[in-house]
């Protein structure tokens, strides 16, 4: 009986998947920027398949929300899906992240090129090659992340809306996603980076954001929301009014 290379590869993949399934605390972020909704839907599709394919949890959010809401709390692995808009600009949900990446490229000579060491990312870009600015935004993100020390895993996906035949955009997206799983399994089966590295990635990212985004607040957000304070107060007021009404009715009887 002879084992083919496919048998060997399949066996290694299954072994890696078993190892990955033990990483119960692992979470992958699927980040997107989307003007027409195609990139967003692709990100959602990937996110929904991750628990089944990799036995880890996943969340999807806009790239801007990753900076502003998530406070650039980098996990060791992110999947990015984005398009371009206008003349190579960022689409909705990616504009501040693009400013962050532009700043990294502009700081190339003085940049700490280890600021994102420990972070790995997969990147799928959507666009239309009939425009001269095709793929400019994904290209800029890819360049910036690598300059900052992050490592791209897998191929740089290019899904062209003007593609035909085997290069049709939907087919390209599907093929890229199919090839993504063994790449992600290999990452989450490896030893994770130290918490110090990921903390450095977070703090360095927030520092750059505070420099280039005028109204960006780098301080941690208070986890106690106004609703957590207001709701108990409102309940107490309603209860007080209710008992006063009952008491008044009793006095009038």
Image (cartoon, rainbow, N blue to C red):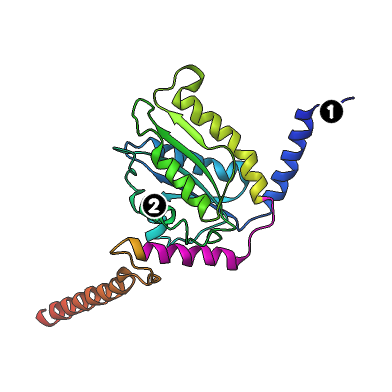
Which range is magenta? Answer: 189-210
Sequence-first disc among 2 and 1: 1
User: Dominant secondary structure of the magenta stretch?
Assistant: helix
Which secondary structure, mark 2?
helix
Badge 1 crowding class, 10 Å Cα cut-off, few under 14, some 14 to 19, many 20 or more, is few
Q: Relative to residue 82, is residue 97 depicted above or below?
A: below
Q: Name the residue rendered at 43%, 22% in the picture.
A: 163
Pick the quarter of the image with the N terminus.
Answer: top right
Asked if disc 2 and disc 1 are in contact, CB closer than 8 Å, the reply is: no
Is residue 78 at all visible to an observer of this figure?
A: yes
Q: Name the residue rendered at 33%, 50% in the picture.
A: 95
Which secondary structure, mark 1?
loop
CA distance separating discs 2 and 1: 49 Å
Q: Does the magenta stretch include residue 208?
A: yes
Q: In this view, does 150 lie to the left or right of 97?
A: right
Pick the quarter of the image with the C terminus.
Answer: bottom left
Q: Nearer the viewer, residue 230 or 4?
A: 4
Badge 2 crowding class, 10 Å Cα cut-off, few under 14, some 14 to 19, many 20 or more, is some
Q: In this view, does 242 lie to the left or right of 37?
A: left
Q: Name the residue under label 1.
A: 3
Q: Relative to residue 89, is residue 222 depicted above or below?
A: below
The x and y percentages for residue 139 are: 45, 41
Q: Which residue lies furthest to the bottom in this view?
A: 251
In the rendered image, which quarter is residue 230 located in?
A: bottom left
Is residue 40 at all visible to an observer of this figure?
A: no
Q: Does the magenta stretch include residue 64?
A: no
The x and y percentages for residue 142 are: 48, 45
The x and y percentages for residue 153 are: 59, 44
Q: Is residue 240 left or right of residue 189?
A: left
In the rendered image, which quarter is residue 247 located in?
A: bottom left
**Label placed on residue 102:** 2
């Amino acid at each position: 009986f002879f084992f083919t290379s496919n048998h060997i590869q399949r066996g290694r993949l299954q072994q890696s998947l078993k190892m990955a399934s033990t990483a119960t605390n692992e979470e992958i972020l699927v980040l997107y920027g989307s003007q027409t909704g195609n990139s967003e839907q692709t990100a959602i599709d990937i996110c929904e398949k991750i628990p089944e394919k990799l036995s880890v949890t996943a969340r999807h959010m806009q790239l801007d929300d990753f900076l502003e809401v998530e406070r650039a709390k980098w996990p060791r692995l992110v999947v990015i899906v984005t398009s371009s808009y206008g003349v190579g600009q960022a689409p909705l949900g990616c504009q501040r992240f693009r400013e962050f990446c532009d700043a990294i490229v502009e700081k190339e000579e003085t940049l700490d090129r280890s600021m994102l060491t420990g972070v790995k990312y997969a990147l799928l870009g959507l666009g239309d090659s009939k425009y001269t600015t095709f793929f400019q935004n994904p290209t800029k993100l890819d360049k910036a992340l690598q300059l900052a020390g992050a490592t791209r895993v897998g191929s740089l996906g290019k899904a062209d809306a003007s593609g035909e035949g085997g290069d049709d955009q939907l087919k390209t997206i599907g093929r890229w996603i199919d090839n993504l799983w063994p790449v992600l399994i290999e990452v989450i089966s490896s030893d994770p980076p130290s918490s110090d590295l990921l903390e450095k990635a977070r703090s360095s990212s927030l520092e750059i954001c505070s420099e280039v985004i005028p109204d960006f607040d780098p301080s941690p957000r208070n986890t106690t929301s106004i609703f957590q304070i207001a709701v108990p107060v409102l309940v107490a007021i309603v209860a007080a009014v209710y008992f006063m009404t009952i008491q008044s009715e009793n006095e009038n009887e």
